[in-house]
């Protein structure tokens, strides 16, 4: 587990250094746009080497549910233009409920609560100009 | 006035809910409501967002005392003595003392914000780029050295935040950096997806069922404290307010730090200091006054200098930007009435929080006991919709996915997430001002420090670093 921190910092450092290489570093009198990303990249590389081993245990992260919820959020981004906000939001809610271990009945109940909540809050009360329903449905 | 009162009421309700429920913190809740505040007047929008933050401090104490489950980090300190009072049959007085201490601290801090902020804003006008760079650098050093986390881990998170801050247009109209040709990234990575992803969803998903093991809360009973409890609480509240106000002014000076400092002070000076471990009143009044005072004193550097003292203030700064409200002296010259309205909103929010919290305790506890299998999917969906509703931009939803994943990775790597937000906000400020100062000084570093501010800030940063090294050595 203790290698994750250095890997994150090394990745960030390499990313900043690679980006900094595109722009001029400049000089002390005229610092260029690449100077600070370069310094930030070097700092991250140094901290990756200096990072202490974690003495506190990392919180147990529920990996599979987290990935499923993130997947549902990505599906929202992919589908909202075609499906509309209401079905996409229900999809996120149902998928999240299932990912967290709820059965189908509970997931459908959560989906219904979300559907009515979204309609009341975002459409009726706040009048956010969403495409609420799928393409082709009347508004 | 009606708008302000409505915003204070809505913010107080949402804030209390956020304080009651562990998982979604005040910064994420404020970020979520940012897009929903568009239709409001700027003063009402700022009041709404600030009230959420203040409300979360109040709400946290309720569940901390009754169930030993604080919804917000600062409630951890109150939970120690407050829950012991509850177990000893004094839950009602503990709740009343927490609410009254918070009220007194909140009103005193509102007065302090009213008096001190214009002075600070006037002083800010005299600062050069080098001074601002030095102040921001001091803030960064304070974030790394003052917190309870490992300094190297905090510095690593801060650096990652700097990296996030580099995305977007370079200062002075330079080339866009790290945008990969995407026009959505030209103005940088959005604050709302960053805060909601790192603080909201990542926290929620990391331990989704952690609060389901809550025991049945003891009955609050009568709220009336005894005369001895009241007299002890008065002095503790005054001390807590002073400690909290001072810490709230510091960058990185969180409400948790204020509550911890207040408890240390109380354990030394309170008349009931021998009762610690059995339910000391001062262990509730002092930390509660301190966390509320710190939350509100954070407005002084934010409004006066445009410097956020903690992540919630960073989101509030986002609210200032969205509503075109300038920070610093410009606020007082362009929109002086707005500052007065913000102060009135603070007072209203504090009064409403006491009115809401004590009679509605039963409801808050019932909400806390709702199984997370119901709450988490609803909060996740509202978060996704809130982020999308801001600009109706899919890029924001993708950023939310990315930042949530980053938050989960940072949790797995035991790297703290709040410094990432500081880095993302303070990094560009530091870079812009330092580059400007270097250009103006034509490379002569000594010429940059033409006044006392920059050298004093650098000396303070050095002292903080030495103190941290000394603490580690002992």
Image: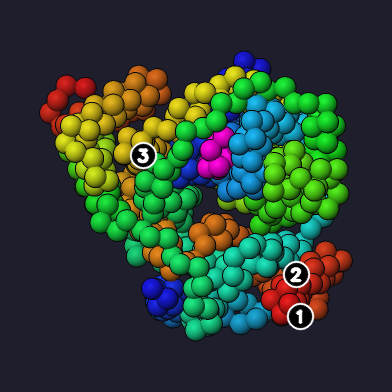
What is the x, y in percent for residue B160?
49, 67
So how many labels did they put on this image? 3
Q: How crowded is mark 2: few (under 14 residues within 10 Å), some or many (20 or more)?
A: some
Query: Taking A72 as reference, is A38 left or right?
Result: right
Could you tell me how far apart the alpha carbons at marks 1 and 3 are, in whole angstroms? 59 Å
Disc 2 with disc 1 on a shared chain: yes
* Dot 2: element: helix
Q: Can residue B283 be seen in this view?
A: yes
Residue for point 21% across, 22% down: A139
- Residue tagged by mark 3? B372
Which mark's residue is nearer the viewer, 2 or 1? 2
Kindly identify which chain the residue marked by label 1 belongs to.
Answer: B
Q: How crowded is mark 1: few (under 14 residues within 10 Å), some or many (20 or more)?
A: some
Residue for point 47% across, 50% down: B199
Q: Earlier in the sequence, mark 2 or mark 3?
A: 3
Q: Quadrant of residue B107?
A: top right
Query: Taking B321 as reference, is B195 left or right?
Result: left
Numbered range of the magenta stretch: B63-71
Which mark's residue is nearer the viewer, 2 or 3? 3
Kindly identify which chain the residue marked by label 3 belongs to.
Answer: B
Kindly identify which chain the residue marked by label 2 belongs to.
Answer: B
Residue for point 51% across, 28% down: B364
* Dot 1: element: loop
Could you tell me how far apart the alpha carbons at marks 2 and 1 are, in whole angstroms? 26 Å
- Residue tagged by mark 1? B444
With respect to residue A72, does B7 lie above or below? above
- Residue tagged by mark 2? B464
Q: Which of marks 2 and 1 is nearer the N terminus?
A: 1
Residue for point 24% across, 51% down: A68
Could you tell me how far apart the alpha carbons at marks 2 and 3 are, in whole angstroms? 41 Å
Q: Can residue A83 be seen in this view?
A: no
């Amino acid at each position: 587990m203790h290698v994750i921190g250095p890997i994150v910092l090394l990745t960030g450092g390499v990313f900043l250094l690679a980006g900094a290489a595109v722009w001029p570093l400049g000089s002390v009198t005229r610092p260029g746009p690449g100077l600070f990303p370069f310094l930030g990249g070097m700092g991250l590389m140094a901290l990756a080497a200096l990072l202490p081993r974690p003495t506190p245990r990392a919180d147990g992260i529920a990996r599979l549910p987290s990935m499923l919820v993130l997947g549902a959020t990505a599906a929202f981004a992919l589908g909202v233009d075609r499906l509309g906000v209401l079905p996409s939001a229900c999809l996120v809610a149902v998928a999240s409920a299932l990912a967290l271990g709820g059965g189908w009945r509970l997931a459908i109940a959560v989906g219904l609560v979300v559907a009515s909540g979204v309609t009341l809050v975002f459409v009726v009360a706040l009048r956010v100009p969403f495409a609420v329903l799928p393409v082709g449905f009347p508004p | 006035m009606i708008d302000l009162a409505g915003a204070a009421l809505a913010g107080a309700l949402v804030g209390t809910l956020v304080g009651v429920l562990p998982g979604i913190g005040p910064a994420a809740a404020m970020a979520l409501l940012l897009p929903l505040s568009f239709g409001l007047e700027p003063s009402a929008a700022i009041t709404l967002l600030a009230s959420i933050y203040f409300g979360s401090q109040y709400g946290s104490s309720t569940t901390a005392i009754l169930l030993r489950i604080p919804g917000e980090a600062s409630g951890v300190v109150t939970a120690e003595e407050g829950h012991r009072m509850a177990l000893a049959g004094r839950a009602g007085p503990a709740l009343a003392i927490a609410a009254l201490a918070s009220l007194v601290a909140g009103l005193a801090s509102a007065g302090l914000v009213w008096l001190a902020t214009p002075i600070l804003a006037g002083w800010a006008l005299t600062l050069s780029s080098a001074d601002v760079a030095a102040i921001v650098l001091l803030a960064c050093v304070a974030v790394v050295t003052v917190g309870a986390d490992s300094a190297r881990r905090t510095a690593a998170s801060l650096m990652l935040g700097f990296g996030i801050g580099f995305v977007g247009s370079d200062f002075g109209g330079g080339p866009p950096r790290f945008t990969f040709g995407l026009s959505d990234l030209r103005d940088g990575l959005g604050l709302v997806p960053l805060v909601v992803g790192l603080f909201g969803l990542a926290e929620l998903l990391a331990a989704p069922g952690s609060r389901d093991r809550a025991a049945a809360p003891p009955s609050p009973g009568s709220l009336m404290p005894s005369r001895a409890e009241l007299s002890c609480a008065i002095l503790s509240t005054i001390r807590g307010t002073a400690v909290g106000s001072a810490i709230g002014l510091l960058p990185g000076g969180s409400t948790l730090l204020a509550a911890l400092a207040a408890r240390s002070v109380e354990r030394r000076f309170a008349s009931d200091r021998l009762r610690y471990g059995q339910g000391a009143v001062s262990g509730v009044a002092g930390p509660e006054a301190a966390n509320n005072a710190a939350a509100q004193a954070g407005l002084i550097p934010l409004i006066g200098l445009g410097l956020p003292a903690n992540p919630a203030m960073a989101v509030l700064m986002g609210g200032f930007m969205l509503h075109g409200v300038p920070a610093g002296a410009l606020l007082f010259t362009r929109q002086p009435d707005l500052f007065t309205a913000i102060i009135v909103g603070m007072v209203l929010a504090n009064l409403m929080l006491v009115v809401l919290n004590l009679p509605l305790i039963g409801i808050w506890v019932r909400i806390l006991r709702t199984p997370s299998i119901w709450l988490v999917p609803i909060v996740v969906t509202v978060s996704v919709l809130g982020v999308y509703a801001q600009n109706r931009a899919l890029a924001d939803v993708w950023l939310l996915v990315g930042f949530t994943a980053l938050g989960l990775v940072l949790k797995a790597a035991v790297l703290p997430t709040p410094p990432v937000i500081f880095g993302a906000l303070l990094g560009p400020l530091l870079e812009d001002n330092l580059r400007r100062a270097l250009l103006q000084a034509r490379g002569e570093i000594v010429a940059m420090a033409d006044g006392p501010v920059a050298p004093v800030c650098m000396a303070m940063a050095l002292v903080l670093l030495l103190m941290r090294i000394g603490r580690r050595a002992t």
